[in-house]
Image (tube, helix red, strand yellow):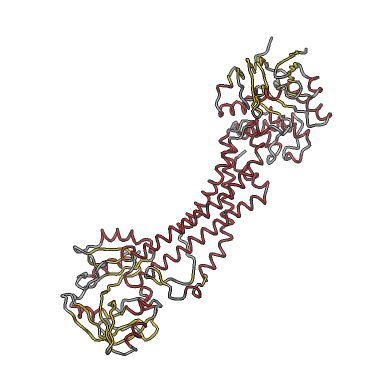
Amino acid sequence: MEEKPIVEIEGVSKTYQAGKVPVQAVKELNLIIRKREFSVLCGPSGSGKTTILNLIGALDTPTRGKIFLEGRDLGELGRGDQARVRRERIGFVFQSYNLIPVMTAYENAEFVLSLQNVDREERFRRVNRVLQEVGLEGLADRRPDELSGGQQQRVAIARAIVSEPAIVLADEPTANVDSATAEGLLDLMEKLNREKGVTFLFSTHDQRVMDRARRLIRLQDGRVIEDEVRP
Amino acid sequence: MRLNLLAWRNLKRNKRRTLITAFSVAFGVLLAVTFTASGDYSYTNMINTSAAMGMGHLTFEPQEYNDNPTLEKRLPDAEAIRKQVTADKAVAAAYIRIIGPAMFASGARSTGGTFMAIDPAAENPEHNILLRNLVEGKLFTESSDRGVVVGARMAEKLGLKLGRKLIFTVTDKNGELTSELSRVTGIFRTGDDAVDGGIVLLPMDLVRRTLQYEDRAASLVAVYIEDQRLASALQRKFAQTVPLNRGESIFTWKQTQADLAGLIAVDRMFNYLMQFLVGLVIAAGIMNTILMSVMERSREFGIMIALGMPPVQVTGMVLVESFWIGISGLLLGVLITAPWFVYMSRVGLDFSRHIGEDYSAGGVLIDPVMRFRLYGENGLIIMAAVLGLTLLAGLYPALRAGRIAPVESLKGHH
């Protein structure tokens, strides 16, 4: 049975102004991402991968078209509601980890739950469980500068999944780590997808990520040129 | 995670910058205390000195006496007023006095001036600048004495010495000229030529007899209060509680010493203006530093907003940082200001070499030693103003932080 759609993109275009020149980063895009998918957006630089993630993540707004997240039109939301959708329904994993440097691994993972006003005991339970899942037990009190790149990205993954979002958007998550660490991170995310049903949408150049994808969406010049679903 | 803790950790990240910013706040405290405390001291000193020249902080007197102090105008039962106001806890002392114009003569020389009739048994030098500055002899002892205390300048003009005779001529309550003889028992020197050459102290009973006043009559009742700032409140209170005859009124020093009040008001406004301008300069410096720290962390703020932190909370976090900078600056300010304040309160800076001992303004001798005195409420106002300015300085950077677009701040950090 086909899973329920999480993200529905209908005729979306995004045009930026690069100085005085308009640049169309995404053109008439139609796309559906379903629950439990492990999908990858790939394509050369400038093909629109990151722009699409930003649009789905309510970090940016389309010039034309509509994006629905769990049936809700993101274009209808004000700034405050967009922030609420991001903290409650979307997990982010960024290329350069982007942890808050003054917080420990535990506090970074806890951050989104604090924003959601989850009570302290529940936070403690969930954060410790997630840190264990990503293999960071014993490192909870370390700050980002006391962790390796791979460990930092694991904290970022923990932060992204701890609130049990509808979808995790991961922008080049393996770009800044060595091969072994990248494989480890992918194993982890695959496991979370398989065992916990976490929906992942990646943007990447990395062949290793593409090889693991169960759906590969190739982009060029802001358009989907291939949408391959793998068994 | 609580905003407070996060803000505090952010401040600890760049300790040197935080310390420099806190020092700017502390410097603001130092300047504000210096401006305010020197004002509090000098204004209070001038007001008390002015009061000690005869009229008190509050004066009960007949209508129009202040504008045209003739001896026909008097309070028939000044003693009753004095008794009633003395019972008030805020009142340090109250004296009945007759003050008016007179001619003074000794031998062939004469001069015009003002006499002040006092009760020697009641007078306290603390409230009488002339008695505080006796340089020769002493005050007459009986109210009915024929003693007189003159200023050094008048003594020079009339060739007076202790024990010499002085004839004073006044217009009595009926408008008749009348003269009396007295002998010099003391000479004072305040340093102000107008005072030393124009004012004479005479015994109350002698003057009453001379003017044909009733036994309890006087020109005025001079009221001295512990805290000059209460003058207006006490004026309102006494206006309701002290029964006065028709035409009798109560005035504050601001009304009886309008020149001085004007001078202080102008000086105080200038003082506030200076403080405001200095505060603005310091606030601009603080704003610049906080703005710099916000710009450096724009990526972090972008991440926080991307993760769903409401922009208003980001703004709040920077404001909390400003608040802690303000609190740290205040504590630091108290630490660096305390020794300066103690020194200035106890010792002060002596400007007598530059302005002399007899510098006066608004008809009042100015203390050539600059000292500090800070009223509690002014101390609180300084703290609130410094904290408020620090928060104000943090407002623009805080709003900038809340308006950061995550997409923009995350760009270029891949």
Q: Is residue B368 above or below residue B156?
A: above
Q: Is residue A37 above or below residue B342?
A: above
Q: Is residue B169 left or right of residue A75?
A: left
Residue B327 vs residue B153: left or right? Answer: right
**Which residue sits at x=75%, y=20%?**
A42
| Placement of the N terminus of chain A among the 4 image quadrants | top right
Instruction: Please tell me which residue lies in front, A180 or B103.
Output: B103
Looking at the picture, how far across and down is residue B24, in whole percent? Answer: 59, 54
x, y (%) of residue A204? 76, 24
Query: Could you tell me which residue is drawn at 29 percent across and 85 percent down?
Result: B147
Q: Residue at x 51, y 60 (%)?
A: B33
Q: Residue at x 67, y 32 (%)?
A: A125
Q: Tell me where residue B207 appears, x and y as whole percent.
A: 23, 79
Looking at the image, which is closer to me, A106 or A189?
A189
Q: Is residue A207 left or right of residue B208?
A: right
Above or below, B288 relative to B303: below
